[in-house]
Structure formats: structure tokens, C-alpha cells
Image: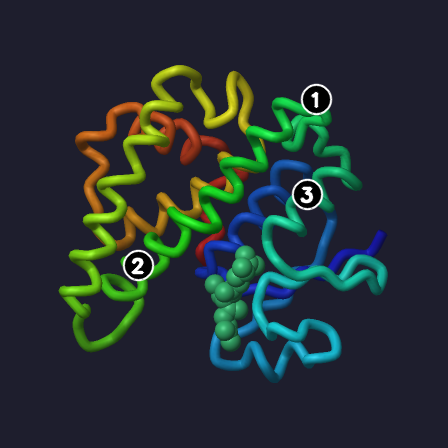
Amino acid sequence: MTIDLYGHPWSAPTREVRILCAELRIDHRFIEVKQAEAGDYLPEALNPACKVPMLDADGFILGEAHAILRYLATTCGGQAWYPAEPQTRAKVDQWLDWQALRLGRLAAQLARERHFKPGGADEAACAEAERLLALILPELDLELKAAPYVCGAQPTLADIAIFTSVEYLRLAGFALSSLDALAAWFATCTGRPAWGGQHD
Ligand SMILES: N[C@@H](CCC(=O)N[C@@H](CS)C(=O)NCC(=O)O)C(=O)O
């Protein structure tokens, strides 16, 4: 299978796919798409949303990071990352949705305001994002007190997705100090060779 991955090094959803590719040693070509050029690079016919990441696997075009993660895990020997056992898989799906619908949006907003956006942050927007993060992150911390990874003893797609959002929180200067288990999990994940050093 010939795999092209369109993405941007600093895009968290792109990072998710790149980390899985590195873990599974998936031979692929990475095509960098500058954020402002996404619409030019990704013609509507290929990807109506004009968003990255986008996968082209032998002409099979797929968008949405989590759909790409599931597809690659299923077709490229990543069953351990997306276990077939129904209850474990349901938990992985639960945390993937949690990341997409809750943590991911807040972390991206905070990173945009505090790190990526030139000219100063919208402090009111940051305060609201921080307030909501303080409400939801203890859910994750509690889970990580019970097991080393989000869905048990081994890392799964859920860890990869959540990791990229926590990276954004760190870029934004958000302190994890009161979330001991989350901070320890983040350090463990950072130590995995496939998870670091792709912001270039
Ligand atoms: N839900 C999508 C989000 C994709 C997304 O928002 N990508 C951003 C980069 S992080 C993008 O392509 N922005 C360029 C644009 O909107 O033109 C996913 O998980 O893949």
C-alpha cells in the first residue's frame, strides 16, 4: 500500500496520525501543507473540509484524524492500539470522543491564544478555557490513577489523541501540577521514541 499523509507538523490531529505511523513503522510520504494553504493543497473533490490530516492510501482518501487512526490501526498491524475486544474498544472510542469533543477543542483554543497567535491572547477566552479544563481534566487524572494508560495497561489510540492535546496545554503554559497521575502519564508518553520530536 502506498500511503501519502498530508498534514502540518504543529497540527495536533496531524501529530496523532504521525505518532501512530511511527509506532507501527508505516512506510509513508509526509506532505507538509501550510495552514493557510490547506484549501489549495486539498481540493474539495478530495477533502471537502479542506482540513489536515488527510490520508491517501492507494487512492483511498480519508480525512478526520480519528477515522485515519482507526483505519491504519486496523489495516497496518495496529490491533494492540485499537483492540477488537468489544469492551476495550468501546473504552478507546469513549476517550477518543472525549478528546475530540471536549479536551481537544479547549487545548487548541488555549494553545492558539497563548502560543501560536501573534499579538497577545484574548484573556477572557483563555480564562473560560482554563475554567472548563479544570472541570474536565480531573476525569482523566482519575482514570490514570487506576491504570498506567488511559484504557488500561497498554497504550491505545486514546493515549495518542489525548497526548497531542496535553502537548498543546504545555505549549500554552497550562500547569498540570495538581494532576499528578496525568503529569506522570505525560512524562511516560513523552519518553516513547515515536512520540517526540515531530514538531519539525
Ligand atoms: N476534526 C479534524 C480537525 C482537522 C483540523 O481542524 N485541521 C486544521 C489543522 S489542526 C486545519 O486543517 N486547518 C486548516 C484550515 O482550516 O484551512 C480532525 O481531527 O482531523
Residue bearing the label numbered 3 = 70
Would residue 100 appear left or right of 108 to someone viewing this image?
A: right
| Numbered label attached to residue 147 | none
- Identified by mark 3, the residue type is Arg
Residue located at (31% from left, 65% from top): 112
Q: Earlier in the sequence, mark 3 or mark 1?
A: 3
Quote the CA–CA distance across marks 2 and 1. Answer: 35 Å
Pick the front one: 43 or 99: 99
- Identified by mark 2, the residue type is Ala
Q: Residue furthest bottom?
A: 40
Q: Earlier in the sequence, mark 2 or mark 3?
A: 3
**Which image quarter: residue 20?**
top right
Q: Nearer the viewer, mark 2 or mark 3?
A: 3
Q: SS for tag 1?
A: loop
Check if mark 2's residue and mark 3's residue have beta carbons within 8 Å: no
Q: Earlier in the sequence, mark 2 or mark 1?
A: 1
Question: Residue 134 location, x and y as percent?
Answer: 22, 41
**Label 3 environment density (alpha carbons within 10 Å; few <14, some 14–19, many ≥20):** some
| Numbered label attached to residue 85 | 1
Pick the front one: 76 or 29: 76
Q: SS for tag 3?
A: helix
- Identified by mark 1, the residue type is Glu
Residue bearing the label numbered 2 = 111
Question: Residue 11 location, x and y as percent?
Answer: 47, 60
Residue located at (43% from left, 41% from top): 163
Pick the front one: 69 or 6: 69
Residue located at (56% from left, 72% from top): 33
Q: SS for tag 2?
A: helix
